[in-house]
């Protein structure tokens, strides 16, 4: 298939090319056009030119576009899923689920709105709060969910009358280019542009004076760079960044019931999820039993190419992440005891066995850093106050979970967590109607819900005095 950039309404090529590696083989499986800085400038100019007329359209017309795009994603769901497996590595079932979620988020945003709010209406003043388009929104997306994250940035931007420029991760550009083809004739030229780069256009887009907002999902390190590039123009920012989510398992938890939920929360997408469980603290009375249950689940996992039937855990997405995982396996061997996994299956791809680590020090880098790999440290605790302090320590605060047979006890404990989201007896759940914030260096701003939708708009107050003239 010939993949194309989307610039000013045209599916177009480039003199520059980018090879896309299949992480299951470690070898290129296709190549795509890579946008030049000049093409990025053309896309920005086109977006600036087209946006006012798009904003002037009735919102119901913009809703129809989101629904039509959702239809096309669903119609081509198998093609999207298979391409995603080849560029990202996740098993086909997980890729198919991402397609479902992408179309679902588009449909959900199509039903949302930001109505004017009357904050005062009396004999003295009529004061209303309105939400107006910002202008051009740039969405910079990571490689772990290449279709879903692109879709849930595009949807609120378009709904509220903005133009949108998508820059996908260089290692997973195919899903974005397929999205470009799906949306190209649904919107006026310039309203949606899709630019693939080799990590060389981010600063241009983030710092450009004609761009009003950047919505970025990725690492905290890169998020700081985006923030710095946007500083000169005081751009609006939404930054969804790294996480080191902890799961606290209380002494009243039923180990057989909670272990599968914790395992799924840790190893979905080979652990490459910002809100995945990345460390577990279990009460000492159930510690051994939980470790063994998690280890048994790890041994049952089937690691392999995501297109092969029966595979439950695919490779890591890229060589850099694979190298980090190998480092953390070394750390696990040095600082703890590996009770399941720890190996690297042959085949040429970036495969890592799902790994459970016990008896590891709380200050080990495997515990304090974000590994973003299928490696899970499990630590015992005796004192709840002490473990809460450990969980809340560090720079991240994206999410966390509490597992307990006593819902009231768990709910009270959730109030002590420094995290954007605290789940009770589940993990990883998110939805378009539920705000998704980050705490500390895990993020800036909010995605989803009314709060997240509002971040794609300019809040404007209209205040009228009555009887003054």
Image (cartoon, rainbow, N blue to C red):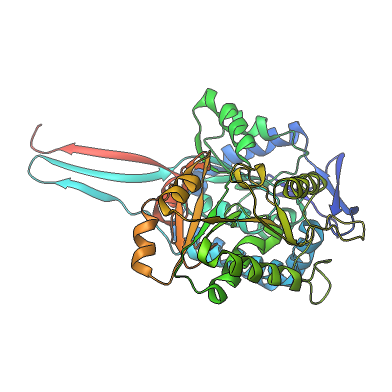
Residue 263 screen position, x and y as percent: 63, 66
Instruction: Please state which of residues 295 and 43 is positioned toward the viewer in this rendering.
Output: 295
- Whether residue 417 sits left or right of residue 205 in the image: it is left
Instruction: Please state which of residues 235 and 126 is positioned toward the viewer in this rendering.
Output: 235
Residue at (58, 27) in percent of width and height: 228
Residue 146 screen position, x and y as percent: 68, 55
222 versus 421 height, above or below: above
392 versus 281 height, above or below: above
Instruction: Please state which of residues 91 and 148 is positioned toward the viewer in this rendering.
Output: 91
Q: Is residue 208 visible?
A: no
Residue 129 screen position, x and y as percent: 29, 44
Quadrant in the picture for the C terminus: top left
199 versus 381 height, above or below: above
Residue at (72, 55) in percent of width and height: 337
In this view, which residue lies farthest toward the top? 232
Tag count: 0
Quadrant in the picture for the N terminus: bottom right
* Quadrant in which residue 94 is drawn: bottom right
Instruction: Please state which of residues 85 and 274 is positioned toward the viewer in this rendering.
Output: 274
- Whether residue 409 sits left or right of residue 95 in the image: it is left
Residue 316 screen position, x and y as percent: 77, 55
- Whether residue 19 sits left or right of residue 337 in the image: it is right
């Amino acid at each position: 298939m010939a993949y194309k950039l989307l610039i000013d309404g045209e599916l177009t090529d480039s003199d520059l090319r980018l090879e896309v590696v299949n992480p299951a083989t470690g070898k290129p499986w296709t190549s795509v056009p890579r946008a030049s800085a000049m093409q990025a400038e053309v896309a920005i100019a086109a977006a600036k030119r087209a946006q006012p007329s798009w904003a002037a359209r009735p919102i119901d017309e913009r809703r129809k576009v989101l629904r039509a795009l959702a239809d096309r994603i669903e119609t081509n769901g198998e093609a999207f899923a298979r391409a995603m497996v080849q560029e990202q590595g996740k098993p086909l079932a997980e890729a198919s689920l991402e397609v479902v979620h992408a179309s679902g988020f588009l449909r959900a945003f199509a039903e949302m709105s930001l109505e004017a709010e009357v904050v005062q209406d009396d004999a003295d003043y009529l004061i209303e709060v309105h939400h107006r388009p910002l202008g051009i929104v740039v969405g910079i997306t990571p490689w772990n969910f290449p279709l879903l994250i692109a879709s849930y940035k595009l949807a609120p931007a378009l709904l509220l009358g903005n133009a949108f420029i998508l820059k996908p991760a260089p290692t997973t550009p195919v899903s974005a280019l397929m999205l470009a083809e799906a949306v190209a004739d649904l919107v006026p030229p310039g309203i949606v542009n899709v630019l693939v780069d080799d990590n060389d256009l981010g600063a241009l887009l983030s710092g450009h004076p004609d761009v009003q907002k950047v919505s970025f999902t990725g690492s905290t390190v890169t998020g700081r760079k985006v923030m710095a590039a946007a500083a000169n123009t005081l751009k609006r920012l939404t930054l969804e960044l790294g996480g080191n989510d902890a799961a606290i398992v209380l002494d009243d938890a039923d180990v057989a019931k909670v272990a599968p939920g914790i395992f799924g929360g840790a190893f979905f997408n080979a652990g490459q999820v910002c809100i995945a469980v990345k460390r577990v603290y279990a009460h000492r009375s159930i510690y051994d039993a939980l470790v063994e249950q998690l280890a048994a689940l790890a041994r049952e996992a089937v690691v392999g190419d995501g297109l092969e039937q029966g595979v439950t855990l695919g490779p890591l997405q890229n060589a850099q992440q694979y190298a980090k995982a190998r480092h953390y396996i070394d750390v696990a061997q040095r600082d703890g005891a590996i009770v399941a996994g720890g190996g690297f299956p042959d085949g040429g791809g970036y495969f890592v066995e799902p790994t459970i680590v016990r008896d590891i020090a709380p200050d080990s880098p495997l515990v304090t850093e974000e590994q973003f790999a299928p490696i899970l440290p499990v630590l015992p605790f005796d004192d709840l106050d002490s473990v809460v302090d450990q969980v809340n320590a560090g720079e991240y605060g994206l999410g966390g979970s509490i597992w307990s047979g006593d819902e009231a006890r768990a709910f009270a404990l959730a109030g002590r967590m420094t995290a954007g989201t605290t789940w009770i007896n589940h993990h990883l759940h998110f939805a378009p109607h539920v705000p998704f914030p980050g705490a500390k260096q895990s993020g800036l701003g909010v995605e989803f819900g009314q709060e997240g939708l509002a971040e794609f708009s300019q809040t404007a107050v209209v205040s009228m005095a009555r009887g003054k003239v």
